[in-house]
Amino acid sequence: MKLVLLFTLCVAHAAHAEEAEKKKDKIVVLSGQNIPESLVAGDTFPAMADRPDALKPEPLPERVRYKFADDKDVVAAAALLKSQLLQEVKEPGKLFDDNVMIQPGAWKCVKSNEGIGKINCIPTTAIVPNANEKLTLNGMVIKDKEEEATLGKVIREIIRKDGGATVRALKTDEMSKLWTYIAIDIEEPILVVDTANHAHIFVCDFLHNKICTMEELNSLPDSDEKPVVDTPSRKSKDGFGAQLLLTDDGKVFKVQNKAGIAKIKALEKAQRNVLIHTAILITDPGTDANGEANVTCDITVRKPDGTVDAEQKDMVGRRSIIFPRTTGNSPRNTLA
């Protein structure tokens, strides 16, 4: 089974200036774990006998990995969206999870409201490599219940102004566009709230039958589907890619091994008597029938004059099973 990954480096900024100053140079690197049950283009879909046609996704495009959920969970998610977004709310507080990730497209639609993104929140920035540039996209994680209630009101008003909406599954082209901007397999329950004139296409991802992530596809730039341009520190071929990062923080590897998420302080200039550590990010390594990736690296260290100081062949970059996730959202990038 092929593990499809996207190089997306996310920089998480603190809400307060003091914390932001401490973290401004850090890159959040997401450790990749695919889902073995995910399907890819050409795979046979489950029967989906107990869900209406509107909640059945279109065929999967190339590259996309998609995991189906039980029909009852998808139907329940659709019912929640209809009751909480398409009509007046009688029981506020049932729509969103404790932490709601407002992805960049959705954030563009709601950030002008003064009641969202002010209390107990985490601004985020996603740096997405494109063919000729790096796109910088801002989002927000909100945790405050009043702000979540305000978010629901704002979305309902957008829907009302657009003449109403329908709840449905993702279309093929929507999956392809969404895939460009996420670092996880697409996993149900995930549904679209499509406004009447198609001005807004909200994608709602669920956890514990509540929205944990919201995106709006029409507010995202269209991808040109061209390969990311190679640089001296980043190369790719046939979908597989690697990027070299240097850091003077050796603790990053211990964090990676324990938590699955590492924050790397990228180093651009060496200092005398300060040890430099090498981090290699790999993308789309592919796996064998057992779900195991096998990546090796050839390392050459050169002196300032260009002569070789040290070499090592066939160093293990990643040789392990890519384990499935059990809860939450599972990122797809890996740190060698």
Image (tube, helix red, strand yellow):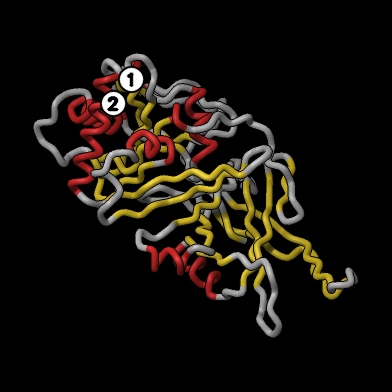
Along the viewing direction, whichever of 106 and 15 lies nearer the viewer: 15
Q: In this rendering, is residue 279 above or below 146?
A: below
Marker disc for residue 261: none
Residue at image position (19%, 40%) is 149
The spot of residue 113 in percent (x, y) is 28, 39
Q: In this rendering, is residue 118 above or below 196?
A: below
Mark 2, residue position: 158
The spot of residue 25 in percent (x, y) is 54, 64
The spot of residue 43 in percent (x, y) is 53, 28
Q: In this rendering, is residue 81 above or below 259?
A: above
As shown in the figure, which amino acid type bears the numbered disc 2? Ile
* Quadrant, the C terminus: bottom right
Secondary element type, mark 2 = helix
Along the viewing direction, whichever of 15 and 76 lies nearer the viewer: 15
- Residue extending furthest toward the bottom: 273
Please tell me whether mark 1 or mark 2 is closer to you in this view: 2
Distance from Cα at disc 1 to Cα at disc 2 = 9 Å
Residue at image position (24%, 27%) is 157
Residue at image position (64%, 64%) is 279
* Quadrant, the N terminus: top right
Mark 1, residue position: 195
Contact? badges 1 and 2 (CB < 8 Å): yes
* Mark closest to the chain's N terminus, 1 or 2: 2
Along the viewing direction, whichever of 328 and 9 lies nearer the viewer: 9
